[in-house]
Image (cartoon, grey):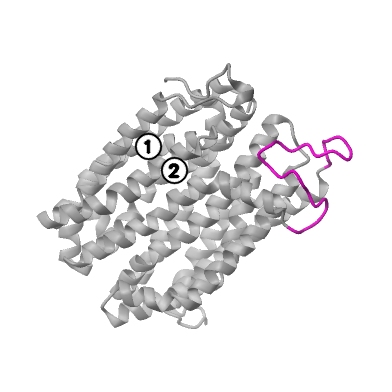
Amino acid sequence: MKQTPIWKLLLKLCPPVMLALLIQSVYNIVDSYFVAQYSFDGLTALSLIFPLQLLMTAIATGTGTGINILVSRMDGRGEKEAQNDTIRSGFCLGIFNFLLFAAAGILFLESYCRFSSGQPSVRLYATQYARIIFLFSLGMFLEANCTKVLQAKGNMLLPMGAQIIGALINVVLDPLLIFGKLGLPAMGIQGAAAATVIGQWAAMLIVLFPVLRMCSGEKSAGIPGKHTAAPDVAAHRAKGSLRPDPYMCLAIYREGMPSIIMQSLYTLYIIGLNLILKQFTEDAVTVLGIYYKLQTFFFIPLLGLQQVILPIISFNFGAKNYDRARQTLRCSILFSLTVMILGCAVFMAVPGQLLSIFSTKKEILDIGSTALRIISVSFLPAAFVIMFTVYFQGINRGISSISITLLRQVALLVPLAWLFHYKGLAFVWLTFPVTEFIALFFSLWLYRRKAPAPAAQKAAPKVLPL
């Protein structure tokens, strides 16, 4: 973290994370593929539930990100004692998040489905699928927290293995449980949901036990009787207790809030876009769902890169090595821009072939080919914006990170889509590139604008120009 050249560090840490996320994206596509073979209405139902799954993932990974940042900063400052408090509190927050979504799945799911679709079969499939996802989501929440702890410690291989195994279990079980093969019951779309949660629980078990051993075996590095945590973590500890530290829980949510908000807003804007697209045809809603399955192949490397650079930036910021944090940003932007240029080229060249993986319906191919070509232009500015959001988060400028997210997903995406929809369906897709270019200019302005340095660091500004 301190001395290895940034490019070598990224080349060492990124491949395991990216491979694991790539496998996950493959199983998401396989999941949709088998559901589409079972029922086209089932595929539409997955598009309706997709925003809710994004919301769950946002809370899970955002909470884990808060744990990751705190643990990485403690390492950078040489503080070992308070890390166990962070991990214990993170476990309790994972259980709390699960209970929250399980209750929501029982109370509000049917109302959401009635609001989102006018087709009874689509509503039925969506309810059947989502109820299982919600009620058995504990594995996903605990896996996310454990994965982030291991990544903060520089262990990228074990989380990669866990996610690959979980994804492979999902892929294998999908056709068996959907269609009832090898003596298993034919569960239809409920089988797809069951395969998903079984894979999540398998991944959780793999990463859980190493983290528990880490907590039980790590010795205090502080002075006996004295708390060594930094000012931004709890001042009071329940040493050895499994109970969460309320102050530490708040610190985790505070550090993870930019990630939670950024990913949670995907849910709101996709629901908003679905409602706008539904005014034209529900085939457009299906196209949007297919797009989000396809774009993961090119956004996955960027998401993996985010997971890797966040602890690097946080560590070096905690160690007051600001030049190294900026160098990490520059390297990550170059990498992400290369990937997104490739993604734009593929979406421009073969949109019909990509769409035909899921559907050969003429309306889907016609609407989707136009949509993919227009949306792919947004990939280029997004390569910068995505890296800036995680950079600001790592250098303790969470407000800047949240501001970019709010601009993109609240102030621009749905309002612009609403304005463009008066010109026709094709214009709605312009929302994506217009939003990303505006967000890029805003991100550059924030980066050039120097934030006030903390009192203890007045001589060293946090952010300098590239």
> In which quadrant of the rendered view does residue 55 lie?
bottom left
Identity of the residue drawn at 31% across and 42% down: 343
Q: Secondary structure at mark 1?
A: helix
Position of 180 relative to 100 (above/below): below
Q: Where residue 87 appears, x then y in whole percent?
A: 70, 50
Q: Amino acid at mark 2?
A: Ile
Is label 2 or label 1 in front?
Answer: 2
Q: Would residue 319 be found to the left or right of residue 373 on screen?
A: right
Q: Earlier in the sequence, mark 2 or mark 1?
A: 1
Q: Amino acid at mark 1?
A: Val
Q: Tell me the residue that label 1 is attached to.
A: 385
| The residue stretch that appears in magenta | 219-243
Distance between the alpha carbons at the discs numbered 2 and 1 = 12 Å
Q: Residues within 10 Å of mark 2 (few under 14, many from 20)?
A: many
> In which quadrant of the rendered view does residue 32 lie?
bottom left
Q: Where residue 325 appears, x then y in whole percent?
A: 53, 26
Which mark, by number, is residue 402?
Answer: 2
Q: Where residue 323 appears, x then y in whole percent?
A: 53, 20
Quick one: which residue is furthest to the left in this view? 423
CB within 8 Å, label 2 to label 1 = no
Q: Count the numbered circles shown.
A: 2
Q: Quadrant of the N terminus?
A: top right
Q: Nearer the viewer, residue 165 or 243?
A: 243
Q: Main secondary structure of the magenta part?
A: loop
Identity of the residue drawn at 72% across and 53% down: 245
Which mark, by number, is residue 109?
Answer: none
**Can residue 23 be spotted in the picture?**
yes
Residue 240 in magenta stretch = yes
